[in-house]
Amino acid sequence: MMMNCCGLLTANKEPVPLKSVEVELEVRAHVATVVSTLNYENKEDKPLEAVFVFPLPGDAAVCHFSAKIGQTEIVAEVKEKQKAREEYDDALSSGQQAFLLEESDQSPDIFSLSVGSLRPGESASIRLEYVTELAVQADEGLRFCLPAVLNPRYQPQGSGGSGGSNVQMTSVPASLVPYSLSFSARVSSPRPVSKVESNCPLDALQYLNTEQTQATVKLAAGHKFDRDVELLIYYKDAHQPTAVVEAGQASAKPGTLMGDPVVMLSLYPEFPQAVMSSVTSCGEFVFLLDRSGSMDGARIKSARDTLLLLLKSLPMGCYFNIYSFGSSYEHIFPKSVEYSQKTMEEALKKVEEMDANLGGTEILMPLKHIYSQPCIPSQPRQLFVFTDGEVGNTKEVINLVKKNSGSHRCFSFGIGEGASSALINGLAKEGGGHAQFITGTDRMQPKVMQSLRFALQPAVVDISVKWDLPKGVSVTALSPPITALFQGQRSLVYAQLTGKSLAAEGCVTVKYSLAGHPTQNQLHFSLKPAEDTGITVHRLGARSLIRSLEMEERERGGERDGEVKKKVVELSVQSGVSSAFTAFIAVNKGNGEAIQGPLVRRNVPTPRLWGGCGPPQSIKMMQGPMVFGGMQSNMRMARGACAPVAKQRMMCDSPPMFQCNSISIEHKQPPRDPLLQLVSLQKASGCWVLDPALAAALGKTSEEVEKPKPALVNQEVWATIVALIWLHGFKMDAQEEWELLAMKAVSWLRAQNGNNQNHKCLSVVFNSVCWLKSAVCSHLLCCTHLFYVFFQLHV
């Protein structure tokens, strides 16, 4: 038991003053407002300082921080970070109560909360509020993630950050977290809420009106902190272009961000169907795989399976290479090679041998090596990054991607619980690509294949946004320029509107070129401010501008006497939204009585996932120190020298996925997934070979597969048709995973149509599928249609 007279204890038997965390989520359309209340209580006989380091979404705009002690509420102010720290230290030194909330210097998704000078027996409630947009998923769901897990972040030597000093690890295994979490959500939208799903147990969805446009849901009691809390919200006919205009604050000066109206545009570009039906056959595809220790188990196995599907789906004529990294990095080829049967087989052989055995998570060096390689003419570079996101130098990595954004697109994949949303979203945003998160029981393959489809789409270039506003109204962009557009994916634009007009409507036009075709999408919107939005849109717009300015400051390296930093601080203070250069500070001066006695520091543990036979031990890592949350050593949470703790392996609760080895009927290993078995046999050209391995993959004998084949029909044509029939008959539920390689097979079949004998396949389709009859009779019409498409014949 972990309870005694002192109340909550850590695994090291130290009292924990944090009792519970209460989270209230309000979702309006695709914008979320989150209010977290942290309840502290000091059950010791000495005054305490509690320090809690925790994750937040990387794109969140933290906009409120307050503390309530008894009946007294102290609302924090935003101040320049160093001034806020000094004010906090001065308050503690003089015996006053103080509260400090600051963003990590290394990663914007990690925050440190310091609760200073809780008297013996005293309680305090800390209220934290932030707003964020919800990301659109492939199935049109809106994803909200409450990060509940914070895994150790690996900080490479010499990368800045901690400067090599040892930093205290204040996390415990998820099963030992000594405080509780309650979570409730309220969802409202102009369109009906069709359903809400989660990776955690939920109470039943409750509708609040007959139109089903408002609903509430709660997290079931007993959350174990073994995963982030993820909600997927689905609306009916949800994703339409919209514009929301929000009035400025009456108390703010006109002409300032907070005093003027701000508009938020949600754009969903629709590309011409003729262009979308074409898939590019060129490109340089570079896959960068995390092989650090935390990728062990189901993660690395799923990554190997995913690389199999990717390699089989690449078009002939492209180039590719595979990098993997940990404390060091490796590449299969010295430089990208042309995709062929020989290079594909060589890469797959190396992929089969890959394991999570490369130590830490140093992603910066392999990225630098990739960018140092000259681009191949007429082969646009597409970078796919797979990582659990446990790095401490997030901003440094994103800076590098942005610096090279003109020469490539970056598609990122956050694997597992606790993956840094700042890193994964930042890579895709600055690299002009698309971000995906794979958590819980999610399959990696369909999400990765969706991103490959995006990468194979013709690149959208020459993107511009034109505003058509009434005379007397001007616009100031708050968002960075749009650098990437994908079919059906939302693009958000924030802008400040200055001036007045009697006209009621404005218009925005997004122009771009797609495969040489000039295209545009228009959205007309009302200039009348929406009701009941408060200043949410202003805060999101301020956050967008702050992040852009922070990136500019990092690129300049503090030139011009910190001119950009001053702008960030000024904007952060004006809008009340946190930044890398500011912090929230609150001081309770109370009745002037100083708190007596020595101050005891308590680090509130954050949940992490770990594997092995028992709790992790403190281990000295040769490659570099572990940094918890990427916090620098000059932050208050990092005071004192403590032994570093090595990165732990992820506990693998899901069943292992089988490696993509060569088929052998006599191989004495557990049976592999039939789909992967069949895919592994496909040739780089797109065809299959009629041999015993194919029959085994289909669960049939060689005779059953070969006997229906017409004598004059090419064996490879027959094998390819049989494989496609099997995919459509048995694996329609996984169509997203094999659709691209099936398209490649169809293209190969069409290329073989010069042989007149091959058309005989159509005439024998009905008696050739007898061995599939019991399972695919409902798909017979689909299979017959498939043959029409292949050979462009008519019955």
Image (cartoon, rainbow, N blue to C red):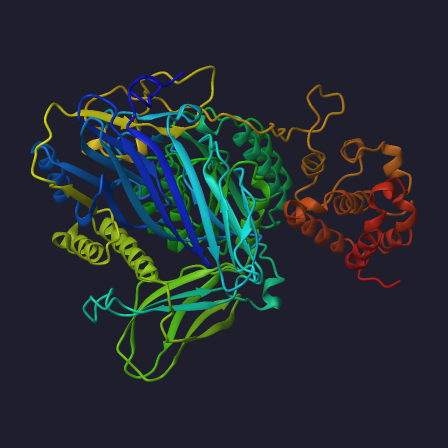
Q: Residue at x 62, y 49 (%)?
A: 316
626, 495: nearer the viewer: 495
317, 587: nearer the viewer: 587
Across and down, in percent, residue 587 comes to 15, 42
What quarter of the picture does the C terminus occupy?
bottom right
Q: Which residue is drawn at 22% across and 42% down?
A: 71
Q: Residue at x 39, y 43 (%)?
A: 23
- Image side of residue 226 versus residue 772, left or right: left
Q: Residue at x 56, y 40 (%)?
A: 444
What quarter of the picture does the N terminus occupy?
top left
Across and down, in percent, residue 92 comes to 12, 33
- Image side of residue 320 versus residue 94, left or right: right
Across and down, in percent, residue 488 comes to 54, 60
- Residue 770 found in image quarter: top right
The residue sitting at the front extreme is 71
207, 334: nearer the viewer: 207
